[in-house]
Amino acid sequence: MFDATIDNMTQTLQIVRGVDWLKERIEIIEDHTGTMLNIEEAVRSLKRSNTFEKLGGVEGAEFSNAQRGSGCTPGSRISLLAMLLVWAKDLHSPHLFWLSGLAGTGKTTVSKTFCSQLNNRGLLGASFFCTLKELNKKNVYLIIPTLARILAEERPKFGDALEKILESDRACRNPTKMDLNEQYTRLILQPAERTFAADELLVLGIDALDECENKDAVRLFIAAILSQKPTIPLKFFLTSRPEISLRESFGTSTHHGWLRLHDIEANIVKADILLYLHSQFKCISRVYNYYQEKSNWPPPEIQAIADASGTLFIIAATIVTYVATCSGNSLDRFQELGKPPPKELDKPSPNVQLAGIESLYNKILDEAFEDLEQKEADMIHSCLLLLVTAQRPVSVNDYAKLLSTNTLAIREAFKSLHSVVQFPDEGLDNALISIFHASFVDHLTSEKHQGKKWAVDRAAAHSATAEACFALMNSMLCFGISGAKNSYQSNENQPDPLELASELAYACTAWGNHVLKAGVPEPLQKQMLEFVKTQKILYWVEALKGKYIVSAMEDGTIQLWNAQTGQPALKPIKGHTHLVRSVAFSPDGKYIVSGSDDKTIRLWDAQTGQPALEPIEGHTYSVTSVAFSPDGKYIVSGSDDRTIRLWDAQTGQSALEPITGHIGSVTSVAFSPDGKYIVSGSHDRAIKLWNPCHGQLAYQDPPFLHNYPITALVLNNDGWIQNPSGNLLLWIPPHSREGLFLPGVCHIIGNAKVTKVELTNAVYHGADWFK
């Protein structure tokens, strides 16, 4: 019995040891499995991040961005914020609330505070604060993609659903270029309705919608949200000025709540402003300490300033900033602005009590230009021109480079404008200069201020900024400008990271916008022509870090070039059988489209040079011009057959019947940046604008002679010169008809003897001369 027990114990120990060995192996397997899971998770995260890059990558648009300013002073706006919270929490309230208000009534401050309160309660889905200070935050088409990305980052299930849609729905290949209604449906509604519970209430906040540039797009944005009520409790909170484009959008709707800030009882707003002023002036030590020592806090000046502010928070905020600025005596400014109006006067002194924001802006600007040399005044005005026109805030150093001066001169120019312009502290020359409030730009550019030394004409300002961009590019652009050490390695393989000076980066990317907004005046046309005629254009391409340039060749091939080295990137792309007339990249750079004298259009893979589709056929003569739509969905082509064709870029099939209307070869076609129009140019000397939805003219042609070149005129059998419409112009006697030819000038010259006929101001008399 004992021996059996010993044997059993020995076997048991052996088994236990075996189990320990197995346990060690299991731990190793688990460790490797965990590593594999971590790798899989990293790959999955990288893949999702890459997918979400298509959503635009706008950063800093959330309410939490410190640059959006502070929220409401504690204790102020209590009833308004309470009312907004009631709307947000009520499952049966409208899914959209519009808070409108005049400039300076505190919309953004309220919006920031409301979003903060929603966030603290777990009710905020995402927020987007628009601003005209930054290019990507005044683009309506980036709002919904950005909200969707933030929602996906905060709520993984929503992110899973959104990722599937972006990967599987071909309509979502370029989300930032989608129709706004489609954006709302595919990027917000569909993933939300698939993942959010019926009681999972969320609010999306959008502030300062009026600061977006494209007013037509703003209308479409609001229409999209109003037209489709979510099936789950998803709500939108919008703020804006009561501009006509927004008022009209909401005019006939019964599906939204709304409140006008400027309609709130004046006594409530004034009490909030007084509370705000108490809090802010207490933080200005020189003011607070002076009155505290006299046991006279709060002083009566605060009430006087509150009265001067009326119901506009922006006046109160600007006065506080004006008093606090280090360029003046804060106590003197406070006491001057806080003087009550003389009792013997029926109305307050205009020098003391400010009637509104315009009076305050006038005072600040007049002081800034007071007692200056002309050179000093010109520098301040140049800074204001750039401040108004800059596509995005630029730094002190950028201002100095663009205006051909130094940072000290820029700081000197802005020193009296710190109450209306956010200006970096000493030593921070790479920090950005921006405005506090959009109303300041409105004030500078208002037509009623024309003639004042500080007034800004927008077109002239854009022209000046465009010229500054050209001057900077002409002086700085050179081979290797981005820092490439050699020409035989790609950007990615350079020994040091490539970097472009910030001022040059701005000039290279912004000059086109400034030229367009200046109205493309003749001096700028000349500068553009001179620019493209020189090697500077190649260095500009390098500065933009463009990878490739595509060109059409006379031998029927297409050549792809490395923009950094100037060397071929691929072997010549072959397929066309005759001269290639036109080539273009797709918006995403993945494809090349080409048109040729062989009457075909071809689509190529830009990475391999291989055909992406079968040849597109339909034109009956040479294809002279091709272009992609901004969203990459369509290709437009023009031809010597006098037609314009629209093609599906995915299938190569015709998307419309041939567009006719030109009476000569169509030499150039292009889409408008928003994709709403096709423009065409022709040998008939006409430029026409077409609607790509139905192929009809977007306007009607006037029947003037200059619509027809002389080469389009014909001599009929009866001796009449007529245009393609059959209108009669001139009868040629029989003895002068032989050898008559019609060169491409405004003369008709007979061959037998010199006969000159001036047709520049000729008038057609219809198809029948005698009636």
Image (cartoon, rainbow, N blue to C red):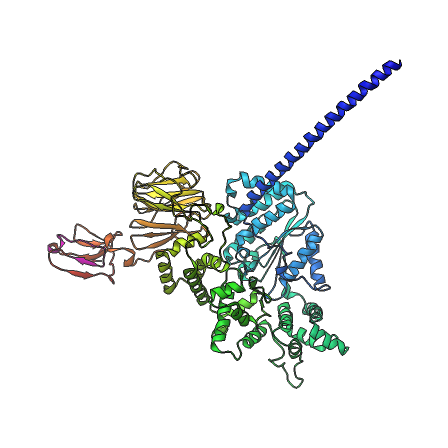
Q: Is residue 747 magenta?
A: yes
Q: Nearer the viewer, residue 25 or 244?
A: 25
Query: Is residue 447 shown to the viewer in this render?
Result: no
Q: Nearer the viewer, residue 209 or 572?
A: 572
Q: Image point 56% across, 52% down: which residue?
A: 58
Image mark count: 0
Above or below for 650 versus 472: above
Determine whether, in the image, residue 563 is placed left or right of residue 39: left
Above or below for 449 versus 692: below
**Looking at the picture, how far across and down is residue 369, in whole percent?**
53, 76
Query: Is residue 160 shown to the viewer in this render?
Result: yes
Above or below for 289 versus 392: below
Determine whether, in the image, residue 41 is placed left or right of residue 705: right
Using the rendered view, name the quadrant where residue 417 is placed: bottom right
**Looking at the picture, how far across and down is residue 697, in whole percent?**
38, 52
Quarter of the N terminus within the rendering:
top right
Using the rendered view, name the quadrant where residue 334 is placed: bottom right
The residue furthest right is 1
Q: Main secondary structure of the magenta part?
A: loop
Quarter of the C terminus within the rendering:
bottom left
Please provide the residue range marked out in magenta. 735-749
Q: Is residue 231 magenta?
A: no
**Looking at the picture, how far across and down is residue 350, in whole percent?**
60, 80
Using the rendered view, name the quadrant where residue 700 is placed: bottom left
**Looking at the picture, how far across and down is residue 377, in whole percent?**
49, 75
